[in-house]
Amino acid sequence: MRKGMTTALLIACTLALQPATAQEQFTLLYKLAKDHTYRFHDTLVVTSSQEMMGQEMKATSTVVSTARVVTSDVRADGSTVLTVSADGMTVSVKSPMQDTTITLSNVVGKRSRVTLSKLGETLARETIDTVKLSGMSMSAGRQDMLRLHIFPDKPVAIGEKWKTVKPDTTEMGGGGRMVTVATGESTLQGKEPRAGHDCLKVTFTGTMTLTGKWSANGMEFYIEGNGKTGGTYFVDIATGLPVVEDSRYDVESTVAITGQQNMTVPSSQSAVSHRTLLEN
């Protein structure tokens, strides 16, 4: 009898020491509906400072845009073909030299096609409608209208982290390009509803490097820089899309200019962005 009681007591103690339930895990994937339209509203505020010919120049730029993302195809491997365009975009600049706001009507409706893996990796990108940009509109018009995060290739529990490396190439003037490589670490913080959606809260931090070369007005431009980034987003569990996102980056860079003028321009840039998924 005593032996039976001892055995029962050991079993009870063992069960009491074990967690009542295994920690819930989540599989993060992009699962978009075919022929569906998703829209995002973005606000980007960039504060920059650069030194030219011994003088410091400061400026604040604000880009407000609405992106349209249409799911053209969903493939058997889970990848998605997206058609991306702008429904609207304005850019405002405040500096000692100017205080102006312009509407970039020439970029509205201009489409590009992006093929996205189920984890958010960009598999292909192509331009459908070309548009000529110059000056201030060139810089704003190159803003990435998609900006989706990369998910881990295995289920994650609350508190778990995953690392990502995301290269991105931006076409510049004169056949040049700028390459940005963001290396980051994301953490699943927990479940938290946002704007009527069942969401997972994710925070991220990381570093970024940028290199590039382009030509304009008979001069060659070369850029090198590095910086830090971080933020928080709430991902819809059903679709994988961000419902709300707030992020920031800070970059220190140097632009070397050759041609009609030769100079080196150091600059610093801080940007704060806010994104919301619009309800159709």
Image (cartoon, rainbow, N blue to C red):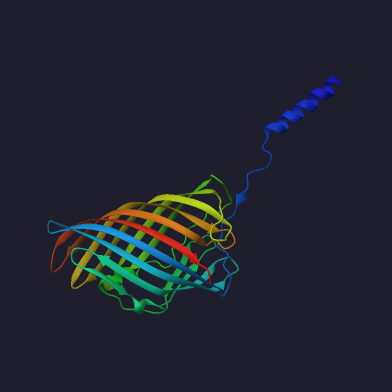
> Horizontal placement of 247 versus 74: left or right?
left
Residue in the image at 72% along x and 30% along y: 14
Q: Which one is nearer the viewer's eye here, 151 or 136?
A: 136
Residue furthest right in the image: 1
Q: Which one is nearer the viewer's eye here, 50 or 132?
A: 50
Q: Which one is nearer the viewer's eye here, 192 or 149?
A: 192
- Counting from the top left corner in percent of width and height, residue 239 is at 57, 63
Residue in the image at 66% along x and 43% along y: 22
Residue furthest top in the image: 2
Residue in the image at 48% along x and 61% along y: 121
Q: Quadrant of residue 236?
A: bottom right
- Counting from the top left corner in percent of width and height, residue 125 is at 43, 70
Q: Quadrant of the N terminus?
A: top right
> Horizontal placement of 4 versus 239: left or right?
right
Q: Is residue 198 visible?
A: yes
Query: How many numbered dots are placed on residues in this image?
Result: 0
- Counting from the top left corner in percent of width and height, residue 146 is at 44, 66
Q: Against 4, is 238 above or below?
A: below
- Counting from the top left corner in percent of width and height, residue 212 is at 29, 62
Q: Quadrant of residue 30?
A: bottom right
> Horizontal placement of 96 versus 213: left or right?
left
Q: Is residue 175 visible?
A: no
Q: Quadrant of residue 224?
A: bottom left
